[in-house]
Amino acid sequence: MKTIRKGIALLFKTTLLILIAATLTPILYFAWQMDKPLSQPEFKGLSYYQYFEWRKIATEDAIVKYMALHPNFEYTGIGSPMTACYSVDVFGGYIFLPIQAFSYDVAALNGVEPYDQHPLPTNVTPLNFVQKWWDTFEYLFWYNQIYLDSFGSLAAYCRLQPNIPTPEEFEVWKLGHQLSAIQ
């Protein structure tokens, strides 16, 4: 009886470790990939993290400029204008897109062929699933951020100019922004 109990405990621990590894592997892979330059030329070599940092600072600047040009504007939404503008980017970029990319890759893994409205990845296998998942995620990110022109927000104070900097320009711009915030 004691041997059976030890065997069940070992099976439970092994299953738990496999589940933890299966959950952490894609998360760690995505975190690692997000620090590399995005492959589409429109991002000008920025990493995913740099792009979101640029977008956050640019959104803050756009709100400040809008408020200066419209002194009688009164925000009536939830939180602040920054919450309204930036939370959609964060929700879409960090929560929705990975799930959407995952569903596209699962469909491709199950043999669904790509077509015009859903450019599913091709040649997805269990061995390259995580890499294909990242590729699909990166494509959907590009599609939503650049191709759909998300710079034209419905809220006027959220609109950004689509002048994405290179990594070098971004670092100089970020430093200048930090210095202006200190003064």
Image (tube, helix red, strand yellow):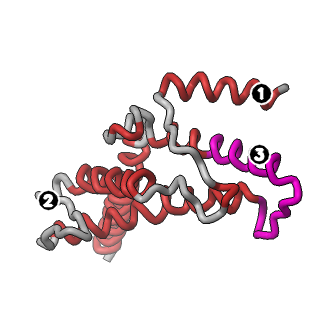
Identify the residue shown where x is 21% and y is 71%: 107
Identify the residue shown where x is 59% and y is 48%: 160
Question: Which amino acid, by three-letter code, is at mark 1?
Answer: Ser
Residue 17, can we see it?
A: no
Q: Say what secondary structure mark 2 lies in.
A: loop
Residue identified by numbered label 2: 122
Q: Say what secondary structure mark 1 lies in.
A: helix
Q: Residues within 10 Å of mark 1 (few under 14, many from 20)?
A: few
Give the magenta-colored segment's residue range: 56-80
Question: Which amino acid, by three-letter code, is at mark 3?
Answer: Val
How far across and down, in percent of the image, does residue 144 sit? 42, 58
Question: Which amino acid, by three-letter code, is at mark 2?
Answer: Thr
Nearer the camera: disc 1 or disc 2: 1
Picture quadrant of residue 158: bottom right
Compared with 6, 148 (above or below) is above
CA separation in Å, label 1 and label 2: 48 Å
CA separation in Å, label 1 and label 3: 13 Å
How far across and down, in percent of the image, does residue 57 sit? 65, 41
Q: Residue furthest bottom?
A: 1
Nearer-N-terminus badge (2/3): 3
Compared with 53, 80 (above or below) is below
How far across and down, in percent of the image, does residue 1 sit? 31, 77
Identify the residue shown where x is 18% and y is 67%: 108
Q: Say what secondary structure mark 3 lies in.
A: helix
Picture quadrant of residue 178: top right
Query: In front: 81, or 122?
Result: 81
Nearer-N-terminus badge (1/3): 3
Q: Is residue 86 left or right of residue 152?
A: right
Residue identified by numbered label 3: 64
Residue identified by numbered label 1: 180
How far across and down, in percent of the image, does residue 98 sit? 40, 60
Q: Residues within 10 Å of mark 3 (few under 14, many from 20)?
A: some
